[in-house]
Image: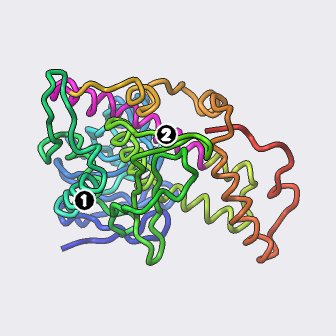
Amino acid sequence: MTRRLPNCLGVLLPIAASCLAISFLHGQNETETFFIVGDTIQSDRHLNVRTSPAGEKLGFQVDGRFGKIVDGPKLAAINSTTYTWWNVDWEIGVDGWCATIGIETVAIDLDHGNTQVAAMLKDRPEMASFVDGQGNRKAITKEDPIWKWVAQRFGTRVNNHKIYWDNSDVKKPDHYEADHTIPWKNQPAQIRLRSKIRKSANEPWENQSLGKMWSSVVFELMNVTNAGGFLRLWDQAKQGRLSRTDYVEGNQVLEYYACIALKDFYHSRFEPWAQLSGYIPNDDSRGDGFYLWIPGSYEAWISSYTDGSYNYFYTYFDDTIVPYLKKKGRFDLERHSPAKPIQAGR
């Protein structure tokens, strides 16, 4: 049995039958749903994490992050409004107490997830095995934590769509390692990955390392589970409510938080696995692949790219959003056309 509740996009998302069929309204028409300890949950917005119910802020989790309920419920008020609080062991990043209105339960189809990972490794054998420090070749299996994490992500649904591995080429320039398709109507969520990349058409193709390929898949899975954020920006841009700069920066901020999460993934999942299994990450995997260099703010991050290779969102806005705005009579020359040189970025 599956219960369904509307999320902020109006899309029906599955709610596990383990939830109690009790809801309360607090504040601005927010619906709170009760869970039980042990439920797997997902953040459905930028979510504050606190030391205790209504306590001091420890940090935050971004939209699309997974965790497990370990304690609760408890009632506590902020600014005279009472919320229900749950202690969450998040898969990555800071753990602590979160209000119910920012989380929802998720159902995981591990059979589907394992099938997608197996197909991916068959199509990209470079990431299926490695030679350890002793010279022994080892295969990555279902028992490895990096397989398990990726399988769990493939096993979730985004906007009620399954996530699939796609063996076709990445739909971006040659220097992009991977990309994803956001689920929409009859279009499924998909992850694509290149085994070779090149910086320009005049340079040779270079093999990606095992670590870089796994990091790229994890990054795209984090992005695709944040489809709600990307779709909201897309919808607001189509309505003419966002300027060109607002649209681009909104998408880049979402990807910045995915980079932060990828760095956390390296320290919490990949690095312990590498140490235990004998895999030796190269500098490419540790540095660029898992964004260990990433600064503490979006502004510092985006300004660090100077080669123009992060202009994808500008190009998409100019080539796709602008023609739509003109067709609908919503185009504003000052807000929707390039008034200054395109910002350099990755």
* Residue situated in front as seen by the camera: 103 or 250: 250
Which quadrant is the C terminus positioned in? top right
Q: For the magenta stretch, what is the residue range?
A: 251-278
Q: Amino acid at mark 1?
A: Ala
Residue 257: which disc?
A: 2
State the colouring used for the structure image: rainbow
The part of the image, by quadrant, that contains residue 213 is top left
Q: Identify the residue shown where x is 35% and y is 25%.
A: 282
Quarter-wise, where is residue 323 in the image?
bottom right
Q: Quadrant of the N terminus?
A: bottom left
**In the drawing, does residue 35 fall left or right of residue 27?**
left
In the rendered image, residue 201, in percent from the top left (x then y), is placed at: 61, 47
Q: Earlier in the sequence, mark 1 or mark 2?
A: 1
Q: Residue at x 23, y 51 (%)?
A: 40
Label 1: which residue? 119
- The residue at 30%/51% (across/down) is 124
- Residue 244 position, x and y percent, is 74, 53
Q: Is residue 330 above or below residue 283?
A: below
Q: Report if residue 320 lies within the magenta region.
A: no
Q: Position of residue 96 (x, y in %)?
A: 31, 34
